[in-house]
Image: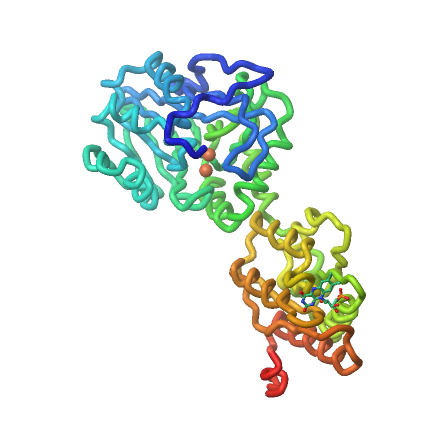
Amino acid sequence: MTSNAPASPTADRARPASGGPQEVADRVTWIGALDPGLRNFDVILKTANGTTYNSYVVRGSAGVAVIDTVKQAFTADFLAKLEAVARYDEITTLVLNHLEPDHTGAVPEFLRRAPHVHIYVSPRGVQVLRALLKDEFDRYQVTVVETGDTVSLGDRTLRFLTTPYVHWPDTQCTYLQEQNLLFTCDLLGCHYCDDRLFNDKVGDFRFSFEYYFDHIMRPFKRYVAQALDLIEPLEIDMIAPGHGPVLRAHPQEYIRHYRRLITKRLASETGAQKTLLIFYVSAYGATAQMAGAVYEGAAESGDVCVSLFDLQDGDVTPLIDLIEEADGLAFGTPTINGDAVRTVWDLLSSLVDIETKGKLGAAFGSYGWTGEAVGMVEARMQGLKMRVPEPGLRIKMHPSAPELEECRDFGRRLAAHLAGRPMEREIDMSALLAR
Ligand SMILES: Cc1cc2nc3c(=O)[nH]c(=O)nc-3n(C[C@H](O)[C@H](O)[C@H](O)COP(=O)(O)O)c2cc1C
Ligand SMILES: [Fe+2]
Ligand SMILES: [Fe+2]
């Protein structure tokens, strides 16, 4: 959305948004918003049946807490639900588990009505909150909380878990101790809109849960692991996420599923051996010949598991899983019209969904006169925070026998880097000057 005007909720062609507050547990009420008409989230996700922005009220004997809010366009709906279950003067606490606008859109309006509340955010969250509230920030009481900190609502206690990068640096989870209930915001959520609200009522939403994981959580697997390390020891009877169904039936199963989704699958098959994937495209076979020779050189020592893939005509999607678990990637592309070939770019741009930082990267390719492709691919790999220890290898037109040997040597060097035994490099000054 580019306009500053409040957006109207997305209209659904098939189903009207409906419903009031819903009790999810004793003295815990859902006051979120249904957005059944949303078809695209954060530009990158398709949302075939919309989403929900879940917000909750927890009522204790000495205080009432609001956990997260909703997207701005749903502010009126949210406030109406809130007012149906609590008076503003009773509300003592606002917990913001994540400051992305889909959860904080209603915060400014809410604060105007309840300026006395204490706001609890993570250390990184406070920076985003300041940016959100601008000059109004100083009017409010904001407390930064970290793992183990608690806030009391009398007979109910909220305990915080700092869980950064699930989905932004600011994310945290909040545990309602007396009821073993975990508020997870984006974590363990999904974009699935159904006013029946509970996982045991809404039917099968697996595809949505996994699709959401793949696009929202997967790039941050390392951080998901850290979050799960904090969550797994907790007794959990219910997970109340910020999007999609409330997980009250078999909540542990969803945590186990996340653990499975972040666990390397190939590692057990290749053992400790490092893996190198070589991808190439080739119009006249020159880059293909280079790729074959790079493969031979890399495979020679036998201490790296090397695989070769021709990207011609292929769908790159299935390769993402392989790449995620590989230690090294080499891309071979000719220069065509001053650029690398489109399938190579398609594959490289698909890597935003996975963590590429620290993987070994290399580029090679045949060219006719300008040969920009190899350098462009190297720059992209560096942009993906891969390490590119060997300068890319370019060969003019089809490789000769000595040039094929250069390719083999390139492969040997890549394998040596991966196996942790980098080879001495003989610097050929004439080659350097020719670049
Ligand atoms: C349509 C087309 C455009 C090309 N554009 C370039 C170019 O901009 N710069 C360059 O160095 N070579 C260019 N070339 C030459 C190729 O890079 C060269 O023929 C190379 O050997 C092809 O490798 P391949 O057999 O692996 O496809 C072009 C070739 C074709 C067919
Ligand atoms: Fe988010
Ligand atoms: Fe979200």
Give the vertical position of 336 relative to 42 (above or below): below
Give the vertical position of 3 relative to 14 (above or below): below
258 sits left or right of 240 in the view: right
Q: Which residue is more in the foreground, 252 or 172?
A: 172
Q: Is residue 358 visible?
A: no
Residue 316 appears at what percent x and percent y?
Answer: 70, 50
Q: Residue at x 67, y 73 (%)?
A: 394
Rendered-image quadrant of the C terminus: bottom right
Which color mode does the image show? rainbow
Residue 45 appears at what percent x and percent y?
Answer: 56, 36
Q: Which residue is more in the foreground, 263 or 191?
A: 191
Q: Is residue 41 visible?
A: yes
142 sits left or right of 75 in the view: left
Residue 225 appears at what percent x and percent y?
Answer: 51, 47
Q: Residue at x 76, y 77 (%)?
A: 404
381 sits left or right of 395 in the view: left
Q: Residue at x 64, y 70 (%)?
A: 370
Rendered-image quadrant of the N terminus: top left
Name the outermost residue toward the left.
139
Give the quarter of the image for residue 59.
top left
Give the vertical position of 59 relative to 260 (above or below): above
